[in-house]
Amino acid sequence: MSKQKCVLAYSGGMDSTISVVWIREQYDMDVVTLTLDLGGGPELEGVEDRAYRAGASQSLVWDVKDEFVSEYVFRGLKAGAMYEDVYPLSTALGRPLMAKKLVEAAQKVGASAVAHGCTGKGNDQVRFDAGIKTLAAHGEPLRIVAPAREWGMTRDEEKAYAARAGLPLREVGEDQRVYSIDRNLWGQAIEGEDLEDIWATPPEDAYSWTVPVHRTPSEPEEVEIAFECGSPVALNGESLGGVTLIDRLNAIAGSHGVGRVDHLENRLVGIKSREVYETPAAVVLHAALRALETAVLTREQQRIKWQLAQTYSDLVYDGRWFSQLRENLDAFTDSAMRYATGEVRVRLHKGSAVVAGRRSPYSLYDFGLATYSTQDAFQHDSATGFIDIYSLPARTQSRTQTMREAR
Ligand code: ARG
């Protein structure tokens, strides 16, 4: 009888390479590695080789960048998903897609288990497990293996384990910091090392996508972003696919030091953790879309949308992507974004991204109504009647209650 198979989400890093060996040993299963390209680097070159050398029976490498952008990133952007006001949910938006692909791959190769490299302390295990369980709720039960959550090895024990298994380790200098980094094209999350002291300024070597402001250009640069129904479609007048647009904007905004976030974050599992993010394109696009919304939405639409954005962010953060509520909120977002078409200019300078102009064929801004110049078209005398009725309840209450008490 042939062995059972396990599909492992494989980045090519040390932990996931050790996991190949570990799953074969502990579970006596064949390991099929699945490497997913969500953009943002690192280079996936040689990843298949590493998987086979660690003992994988099969190695799959799938480019899912387009799907990531159209089905996850732009949905999050349109919904205004910014966790605790600062984190554009780059990692959190990637996990449900990875869970979905793990389930798909398991079906494809006939595996009875899937595995991911999350520890027992983070949000990512929740996103993976909840996503996998929800998607595999009908059909054969799919076992979930999480080596790093199960093996209880310290960093040094992991190294010893890798050495025993004959796995090549990347040489790390004595004084070199090794951060825990998760990245995709929407941003990178940097944790660990000196960042665990929340009083300490993040060391410069934590950053790799953004230039420190003392080395950014002294002149500001403006970028123009075009949106169609809330999705970015062009950069500086050039129509671009989502992946290219985000890549280019990451480079431009990053060169001005835009997109650094230092956040003490509330994890779903109850821990507070220091998270440093680099997310230049996301910062610019969120600011730009919000500015466009101020032009095309009424005040009530804006308020409701911005309130729901928080619900949406928590939902994504908490691993509830595959829920009807998320779909309901997307339906609201799509409806609210029907006229979010137009352009926004954003000025990048010394770490900041500031909206400098917005326009839309559906803009609700009426120059004639707003102007204080001679072209003023507003009916000034209609204001007094409006205020009379508007203040009626307050005046009545004042007369019959508050003033009577004072007497
Ligand atoms: N704190 C972020 C989140 O929960 C990022 C997690 C990054 N994960 C990692 N393995 N470094 O979405």
Image (tube, rainbow, N blue to C red):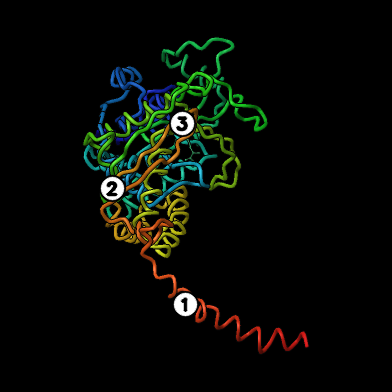
Q: Where does the image place residue 61, in percent across and percent down from the top left? A: 26, 28
Query: Of 333 and 8, which appears nearest the observer?
Result: 333
For the question of whether residue 31 can be seen, the reply is no
- Location of the C terminus by quadrant is bottom right
- Tag 1: amino acid: Phe
Left-right relation of 236 to 17: left
Name the residue rendered at 27%, 43% in the picture.
70
Which of the pair 374/25 is nearer the observer? 374
Give the total number of marks visible in the rendering: 3
For label 3, the crowd category at 10 Å Cα-Cα, with few meaning under 14, some 14 to 19 and many 20 or more, is: many
Q: What element carries label 3?
A: loop
Q: How far across and down, in percent of the image, does residue 405 sit?
A: 75, 87
Helix, strand or loop at label 2? It is strand
Disc assigned to residue 258? 3
Please name which of the two marks, 3 or 1, marks the residue nearer to the observer: 1
Q: How far apart are marks 3 and 1 (CA)?
A: 45 Å
Q: Do the residues labelled 3 and 2 touch (CB within 8 Å)?
A: no
Amino acid found under the numbered disc labelled 3:
Val
Q: Is residue 177 depicted above or below 382 in this figure? A: above
Which mark's residue is nearer the viewer, 2 or 1? Answer: 1
Q: Where is residue 230 in the image (x, y as percent from the top left)?
A: 30, 50
Mark 3 C-beta closer than 8 Å to ligand 1: no
Q: Residue 74 at x, y = what percent?
A: 32, 45
Residue type at the position of mark 2: Gly
Task: Say if residue 241 shows up in the picture.
Answer: yes
- Residue that label 1 marks: 386
Give whichever of discs 2 and 1 has the lower sequence position: 2
Tell me whether circle 2 and circle 1 mark residues in contact (CB < 8 Å): no
What residue is pinned by disc 2? 342
The furthest residue to the right: 407
The image quadrant of residue 153 is top right
- Mark closest to the chain's N terminus, 3 or 1: 3
